[in-house]
Image (cartoon, rainbow, N blue to C red):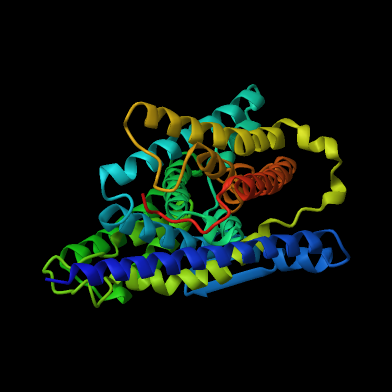
């Protein structure tokens, strides 16, 4: 049997690496978004637009995929991001923060309320406009990298429990966003393409059940699933989710010593994490955050779509997250993590309003055929994320203890 102390030490080391990587990636994400805005509002705009619209064609025999670079980023690179999200969700569900009822109850309840309340606010503001209502899910998600990047600015004053809670809420948010994309943001379906995708998924399932731990066959079949899903009308990023859920996390024959060796899932997660944090998400932010601000006046923020996103993220997220946390604590269902009180819980709620990556992604799906509304949605996401980040940072800066946080007691 593996040494329990060794397992705990490896888990703690892995958690610290994860939080450090996410925080650094969040800072890089901010820089990429700022660079995109700079390019879109200077003479570099022509270069920037040319970069996003650059035609890219991939062909194998009769199979031809031709898309502008922007769509390759949103459909291709983001599939890798969703693959990593699925790996994180599966690991957390089997052996991490989502594996026990006590650990799961508070972030699950907070995340559900943090999705429902912003969506309800957006619906209230945009009700009656069927086109605008396609964006109801835009304010539903939290950007974990961006939010942890803000927390990192506060250094050791931040309790580890707060980082864990924020991370877990964001993971559940991502799961909710995946379900929303699958159910509400698909186009006309090709049953033939879905049939081929199903066959490849069945192949991965068989590999998993036969305890195949080599990653190569899963990734090759995952690439097949991506092409088939892309051609089917279902959004291609869901192929990354399916592939991630098929990667084995533990050895059913117990041949892997967890104290000294990572599971296939952990191996792939560790390999992908730096690429996603330092390349894929910054490239996505650069390609999607470039908004020509000269086309807007300040009053445009008060239009229904950006206002619904702004109020949903800045007000709806903390109302849902903190309100549910208070109710759950009062009912005895859950308790705040060690080192946290109501004031720090409010700081978490404010930071959950940083939607950014997932909000921009859902906006690109919701308003793909409505250019003006997509621009208004991007405006709402950018303004809301900045307001949420600043308010969360300032609130925690003045309310967290001045000395380094501990989790004792």
Above or below, comparing residue 237 to residue 64 in the picture: above
> Residue 351: x, y in percent?
58, 46
- Seen in the image, is 2 located left or right of residue 172? left
Above or below, comparing residue 77 to residue 257 in the picture: above
Q: Which residue occupies the foreground of this view, 254 or 105?
A: 105
Q: Which residue occupies the foreground of this view, 105 or 53?
A: 105
Above or below, comparing residue 46 to residue 304 in the picture: below
Q: Residue at x 77, y 63 (%)?
A: 49
Q: Which residue occupies the foreground of this view, 119 or 20?
A: 20
Q: Quadrant of residue 183?
A: top left
Above or below, comparing residue 139 to residue 60 in the picture: above
Q: For the image shown, how many numbered marks are present on the structure? A: 0
Q: Quadrant of the N terminus?
A: bottom left
The answer to whether residue 350 shows anywhere in this view is: yes
> Residue 396: x, y in percent?
60, 47
> Residue 236: x, y in percent?
47, 56
Q: Quadrant of residue 218?
A: bottom left
- Seen in the image, is 317 located left or right of residue 129? left
Q: Which residue occupies the foreground of this view, 178 or 323?
A: 323
- Seen in the image, is 88 located left or right of residue 132? left
- Seen in the image, is 192 located left or right of residue 379? left
Q: Residue at x 62, y 33 (%)?
A: 315
The answer to whether residue 228 shows anywhere in this view is: no
> Residue 106: x, y in percent?
38, 39
Q: Residue at x 39, y 64 (%)?
A: 15
């Amino acid at each position: 049997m593996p040494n329990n102390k060794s397992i705990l030490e490896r888990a703690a080391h892995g958690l610290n690496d994860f939080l450090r990587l996410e925080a650094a990636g969040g800072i890089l994400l901010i820089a990429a978004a700022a660079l995109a805005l700079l390019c879109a509002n200077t003479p570099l705009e022509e270069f920037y637009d040319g970069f996003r619209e650059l035609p890219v064609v991939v062909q194998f025999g009769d199979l031809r995929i031709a898309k502008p670079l922007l769509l390759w980023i949103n459909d291709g690179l983001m599939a890798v991001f969703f693959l990593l999200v699925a790996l994180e969700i599966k690991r957390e569900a089997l052996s991490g923060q989502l594996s026990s009822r006590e650990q799961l109850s508070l972030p699950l309840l907070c995340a559900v309320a943090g999705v429902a309340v912003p969506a309800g606010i957006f619906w209230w503001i945009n009700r009656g406009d069927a086109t605008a209502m396609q964006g109801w899910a835009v304010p539903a998600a939290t950007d974990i990298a961006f939010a942890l990047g803000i927390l990192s600015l506060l250094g050791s004053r931040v309790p580890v429990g707060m980082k864990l809670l924020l991370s877990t809420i964001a993971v559940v948010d991502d799961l909710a966003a995946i379900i929303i994309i699958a159910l509400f943001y698909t186009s006309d379906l090709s049953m033939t393409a879905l049939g081929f995708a199903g066959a490849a998924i069945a192949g991965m399932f068989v590999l998993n059940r036969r305890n195949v731990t080599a990653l190569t066959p899963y990734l090759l079949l995952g690439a097949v699933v991506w092409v088939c899903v892309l051609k089917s009308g279902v959004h291609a990023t869901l192929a990354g989710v399916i592939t991630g859920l098929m990667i084995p996390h533990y050895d059913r024959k117990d041949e892997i010593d967890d104290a000294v060796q990572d599971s296939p899932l952990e191996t792939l997660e560790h390999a992908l994490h730096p690429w996603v944090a330092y390349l894929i998400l910054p490239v996505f932010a650069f390609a999607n955050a470039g908004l020509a601000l000269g086309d807007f006046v300040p009053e445009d923020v008060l239009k229904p779509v950006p206002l619904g996103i702004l109020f949903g993220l800045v007000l709806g997220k903390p109302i849902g997250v903190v309100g549910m946390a208070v109710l759950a604590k009062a009912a005895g269902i859950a308790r705040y993590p060690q080192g946290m009180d109501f004031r720090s819980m409010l700081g978490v709620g404010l930071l959950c309003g940083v939607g950014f990556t997932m909000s921009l992604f859902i906006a690109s799906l919701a308003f793909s055929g409505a250019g003006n509304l997509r621009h208004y949605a991007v405006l709402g996401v950018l303004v809301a994320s900045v307001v949420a980040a600043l308010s969360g940072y300032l609130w925690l800066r003045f309310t967290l203890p001045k000395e380094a946080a501990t989790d004792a007691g």
